[in-house]
Amino acid sequence: MVLRQPNGSEIVVTTMGVGQYFGEIELLHGSANIATIRAGFTTGVEVIVLDHAEFSHLVAESPTTQATIDRVAHQRVAENTAARQDEKEVGVHA
């Protein structure tokens, strides 16, 4: 997962593996994309696309799923914030 900085540089925030998902922050909060996902050259990738209505319907059917997705979204926001802060600190000390 890559975040683009205002100056055009990019920060790799995380590398995803089997069974992981992305896009939940935008679907939960109705916001614009905040990160970019790129598939690696050495591994395959399978993607399923859900629109906001389908995502909301599926999540509403399972409180456990809702809680898990909320937790993951919160963790990802924290990762993104930390990565941006780390990048700022590196820029200040460079």
Image: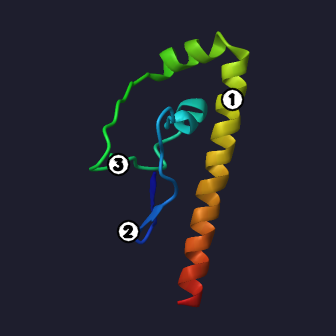
**Of label 1 and label 3, which has the lower sequence position?**
3
The residues bearing labels 2 and 3 have C-alpha atoms spaced at a distance of 17 Å
The residue at which mark 3 appears reads as: 38
Q: Amino acid at mark 2?
A: Gly
The residues bearing labels 1 and 3 have C-alpha atoms spaced at a distance of 24 Å
* Extreme residue toward the front, this view: 42
The residue at which mark 1 appears reads as: 68
Image position, residue 33 (x, y; %): 46, 44
The residue lying at 35 percent from left, 30 percent from top is: 46
Q: Amino acid at mark 1?
A: Thr
The residue lying at 29 percent from left, 48 percent from top is: 42
Residue 57 image-quadrant placement? top right
SS at circle 3? loop
Q: Nearer the viewer, residue 91 or 71?
A: 71
The residue lying at 51 percent from left, 54 percent from top is: 14
Q: Is residue 88 above or below residue 49?
A: below
Residue 93 image-quadrant placement? bottom right
Q: Amino acid at mark 3?
A: Arg
* Extreme residue toward the top, this view: 61
The residue at which mark 2 appears reads as: 8
Tell whether 67 sits left or right of 9. Answer: right
The residues bearing labels 1 and 2 have C-alpha atoms spaced at a distance of 33 Å
**Of label 2 and label 3, which has the lower sequence position?**
2
**Of label 1 and label 2, which has the lower sequence position?**
2
The residue lying at 34 percent from left, 36 percent from top is: 45
Binning the other alpha carbons within 10 Å of mark 1 as few (below 14), some (14 to 19) or many (20 upward) gives: few
SS at circle 2? loop
* Extreme residue toward the bottom, this view: 94
Tell whether 19 sits left or right of 28. Answer: left
